[in-house]
Image (tube, grey):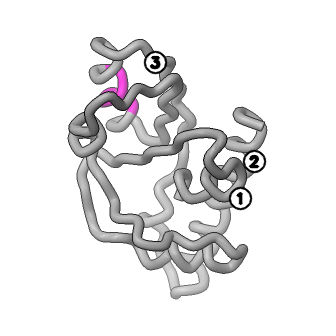
């Protein structure tokens, strides 16, 4: 979600890459929450940190993590990479309970929070 938001607001002026601790399937609630505001995931597939590490010549200036496990993984990665790491504690919307609309509300809240944080930090 964060990568799609960053690309939407900043285009090609900033490189965005995203990764999770574990690769997985695309979350349909992420796609739905982004689609509501005109942002498409396109053919994006979730990646792991290892997937990003395999991209030769790729260097990051800033790594923003949203979960404790990802933060620890990023700190390990930056032992050999000169990049700043920031941790933005973020609730996991996939843990929301209730009906479809209630679950989607958790993703909407995350979407709005990420838009605010990304545009404030990088804008």
Q: Position of residue 23 (x, y in %)?
A: 25, 56
x 49%, y 41%: residue: 66
Residue in the foreground of this view, choosing between 65 and 68? 65
Does the magenta portion include 91?
Answer: no
Which mark is first along the chain, 3 or 1?
A: 3
Q: Is residue 40 above or below residue 90?
A: below
x 66%, y 58%: residue: 8
Q: Which residue is mark 1?
A: 112
Report the predominant secondary structure element of the magenta stretch: helix
Q: Secondary structure at mark 1?
A: helix
Q: Secondary structure at mark 3?
A: loop
Q: Is residue 39 above or below residue 84?
A: below
Highlighted range, magenta: 71-75
Q: Which residue is mark 3?
A: 83
Marks 1/3: CA–CA distance: 26 Å
Marks 1/2: CA–CA distance: 6 Å
**CB within 8 Å, label 1 to label 2:** yes
Look at the image and tell me whether residue 30 can be seen: no
**CB within 8 Å, label 2 to label 3:** no
Q: Is residue 77 above or below residue 116?
A: above
Rendered image: mark on residue 116: 2
Q: Secondary structure at mark 2?
A: helix
């Amino acid at each position: 979600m964060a990568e799609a938001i960053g690309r939407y607001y900043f285009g090609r002026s900033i490189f965005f890459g995203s990764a999770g601790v574990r690769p997985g399937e695309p979350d349909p609630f992420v796609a739905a929450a982004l689609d509501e505001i005109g942002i498409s995931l396109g053919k994006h597939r979730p990646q792991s940190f290892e997937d990003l590490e395999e991209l030769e010549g790729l260097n990051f200036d800033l790594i923003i993590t949203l979960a404790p496990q990802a933060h620890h993984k990023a700190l390990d990665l930056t032992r050999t990479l000169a990049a700043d790491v920031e941790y933005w504690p973020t609730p996991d919307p996939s843990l929301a309970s209730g009906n479809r609309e209630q679950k989607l509300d958790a993703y909407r809240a995350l979407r709005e929070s990420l838009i605010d944080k990304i545009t404030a930090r990088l804008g």
